[in-house]
Amino acid sequence: MPPADGYGFFTGGPGPGGYSPTMGTSKADRPYGRMHEPVAEPEPEAAPAPVRRRSFWQRARETDRREVLITLLLVTLGATLIGGVINPAPRPFSQRQIDQIAQLAIASATPRADPGIGLYQHLRPSVVSVRSRLGTVDGPEAQGSGVVIDESGNILTSLHVVAGAARIRVIFANGAESVAGIVSQTPQNDIAMIRAATPPRGLIPAVIGDSRSLRVGEQVWAIGDPFGLSASMSAGVVSGLGRSIVVPGRQQPLGNLIQFDAAVNPGSSGGPLVNAKGDVVGIVTGIAQTGPTGRDVFAGIGFATTIESAGGGGAPIQ
């Protein structure tokens, strides 16, 4: 076998003259000898981004913010629920409630009726006109008023209206008339009690009050027949208590009187003085003298005997 070229080697099989050398890669072909195919190196992987670490205080602040937000949400929800329980949403008004509100609004806008209207309607059935014939049955007629105090027909009036009368006649609120006679009298208080012989059915007595509860400035009303104008009403206030006046022809003055400024005139004597409850607290007895002329006209000062002095005593007189 021929020696291999120092720079190559033989390959192949025997040819016609023995071995047929086949020239392999020679040094001339590859001056640096046989070289291996280069192996591609893998590309280096990209380095991962560096992890940015948060400090303890940053993590604490983020945790605190979350907790604060959660706490605020829970507090808001709780307040809403509690508010709904304590102050539930208003329900719509029913038709009945709307009607009641409308009625209250109308009532508040409507002026209230004067109390005197109700008092008059309450007292009018108990007030009578008193007519007296002085001296004889054909003598001059004196006019006055009276108030019914029981269903039997007993009536309180002023003594000077019926004193010395030959005939007494009373006219009731319903127009019925009856003769009457004096049952009792108390001259020191100018009070007489008369009784109707034939009182009408369904007679309504007045309610007897208590004059001791009166106060100066308190409102009072007088009902009577001033100048023959039957069933007239006037309003005023209590001007004084415990007054005394001198009456012509009397030895002793009238005492313990109620002074008031409700208008009264001749014919009002014997009528009731009533308080705001409609209770009789006095019997009108006179007015102050207006001057030397002696004309009996109202000058703003009237007087009434207290119901206790008249014998009422807080109960009907028998």
Image (cartoon, helix red, strand yellow):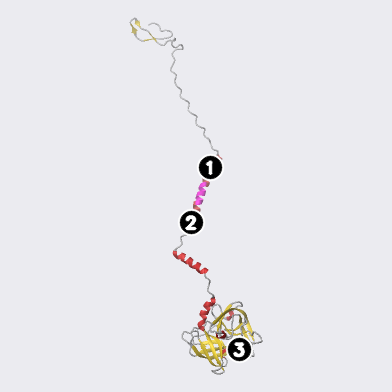
Residue lying at the far left in this picture: please name it: 16
The reply to whether discs 2 and 1 touch (Cβ–Cβ < 8 Å) is no
The one nearer the camera, 152 or 249, is 249
C-beta proximity under 8 Å, tags 2 and 3: no
Residue beneath disc 2: 84
Question: What residue did someone put label 1 on?
Answer: 62
The chief SS type of the magenta part is: helix
As drawn, 58 above or below 36: below
Could you tell me residue 137's position as x and y percent?
54, 94
| Element under disc 1 | helix
Q: Dot 3: within a 10 Å radius of its alpha carbon, few (fewer than 14), some, or many (20 or more) residues? A: some
- Residue 254: x and y, percent? 62, 86
Helix, strand or loop at label 3? It is: helix
Q: Which residue appears at 48% of the width and 54% of the height?
A: 81
Residue 188 badge: 3
**Numbered disc total:** 3
Q: Which segment did they paint magenta?
A: 69-76
Amino acid type, label 2: Gly
- On the image, the x and y values in percent for residue 151 come to 49, 85
Ranked by sequence position, the earlier of labels 1 and 3 is 1
The local crowd at label 2, few if under 14, some if 14 to 19, many if 20 or more residues have their Cα within 10 Å, is few
User: Could you tell me the amino acid type at mark 1?
Assistant: Glu
Farthest residue, direction top? 17
Asked if 68 appears above or below 270 in the picture, the reply is above
Q: Of residues 228 and 258, which is closer to you in this image?
A: 228
